Image (spheres, rainbow, N blue to C red):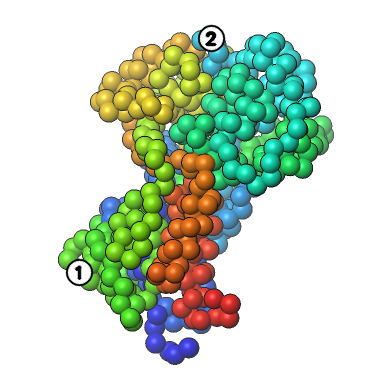
Amino acid sequence: MSDKHLHVTIVGGGITGLSAAYYLQKWSREEGIPVRFALLEESGRLGGKIQTWRHQGFTIELGADSFLERKTSASQLIADVGLGDQLVHNHAGQAYIVHKDRLVSIPEGAVMGIPTKLLPFVWTPLVSPLGKLRAAADLVLPGGKPGEDQSVGHFFRRRLGDEVIENVIEPLISGVYGGDIDKLSLLSTFPQYAQMEQKYRSLILAMKNARPPAKPEQSKKPTGMFMTLKGGLQSLAERIEQLLPEGAVQKNTGVRHMEKRPEGYVLQLSDGRTLRTDAVLLAVPHPVAQELLRPYVDIPPLSGAKPTIMATVALAYPAEAVPLDVEGTGFVVPRKANYTITACTWTHRKWPHTTPEGKALVRCYVGKPGHEEIVDRSDEEIVDVVIRDLRRVMKVGDTPEFYRVTRWNRGLPYMVGHQQWLRDVTAKVGAALPAVRLAGASYGGVGVPDCIDQGKRAIRELLDHLTQKPGN
């Protein structure tokens, strides 16, 4: 390898692109690889769907609010950039499902709605006696075919029946992915359940075996499985930006065209400039990448489904205006229930660090698949509808001290066949454009750790390709 500096361009300043930029800088220094890079972001801010609003002492997440602790890449990145002492767990507490205009506890021992304890499931009003009997059939039903993709809805209906799906599992799953669970790919979203079925045949038995043993000696309030940062997740984006080389980050700079040349690639930027580079990481939504790649490789859209449009609604109150008479951290709403909201988090309980003393913070979600018209209404109309829905199941004041409505395009959910689609796309791009990679929520997972993993993996592959390491 010569001493000539290589150049890498990362398109997209969300958490995928930021992670890639950070580890590109880190690894190139550690390995003595002379690399310069540019991180291009079309908007005026970094972080993508990570966005924190700090207002009147509140720390309010407008997009992603946390990540699963067991997916370690996020906490590792946070430690790497020096923010490890800012990590906090959520306060674990009872979660509820709206049922006949009442908040009903999710049965004790249920994991993603799958029962692992008998008595709490027997007594829950969420499922009728016939529905419970049908769910119990999971204990004797045969397993499915190994390796075959199917919809999340079909899989759980086959194991547990319609009623458990519609009243318990679907509202829990839709909070993560949105979209129609009867089209959502099992292997791309919840592959662990397919693996459990193959190993144990019964999901109920599998979940029972997978549960860690209870620790009765622990008397303190249990911590949850999610983590975030005291200053909000946006503080991670801010810290990474501080650590990148001066001039590497270029905001308000999009890419309009990409040209492949013998010596690399030339990017036509939105401000009229051109940028020559040796490798490109497209950490942008798939429709954007698809257009840039079109002259060289024709890759299909993610699916025929429409993007899921949703909104988050943050409502701040004096604590006395939200007198919760139940323990817990929030509730979800079944799709068939006559509500506009799909979920509600009592943020001041789940994440106490976000809310000043004597205040309450409630965060709601609206935008059911096929019924996204609510998102097109004015902020004031959305807030009115949300408060009306809330008052059907809990006490809450008519007028919050302030509110914030944020609209998001959640992108296309992963349809059945997504993994094969991804393999095909990866192969086509690799053959036509060897020094180009795709990464982000359109491809290998939508959570913060999933995007970090993809950014790290893609930049590692590009570094190895550019330095012509054996096996690449």
Tell me the residue that label 1 is attached to. 273
Where is residue 459 drawn, in percent x and y?
Answer: 48, 67
User: Disc count in the image?
Assistant: 2
Residue under the point 45% across and 40% down? 413
Residue 166 x/y as whole percent? 56, 21
Q: Name the residue located 48 percent from the left edge and 63 percent from the top edge.
A: 427
Quarter of the rendering occupied by the C terminus: bottom right
Q: In this view, does 108 lie above or below 188?
A: above
Left or right, 65 with respect to 402, comes to right
Residue on which the image places disc 2: 100
Residue 12 appearing in the image: no
Please say if 381 is above or below 210. Answer: above
Q: Which of 43 and 255 is in front in this view?
A: 255
Q: Which of marks 2 and 1 is nearer the N terminus?
A: 2
Q: Which is more toward the observer, 76 or 354?
A: 76
Query: What kind of residue is marked 1?
Result: Arg
Query: What secondary structure is found at the residue carrying circle 2?
Result: loop
Q: Which residue lies furthest to the bottom in this view?
A: 2
325 lies left or right of 196: left
In the picture provided, is 175 more to the left or to the right than 208? left
Callout 2 touching callout 1 (CB < 8 Å): no
Write the residue at 47% across / 71% down.
462
Please say if 206 is above or below 368: below
CA gap between label 2 and label 1 equals 59 Å
Res 118 → quadrant: top right
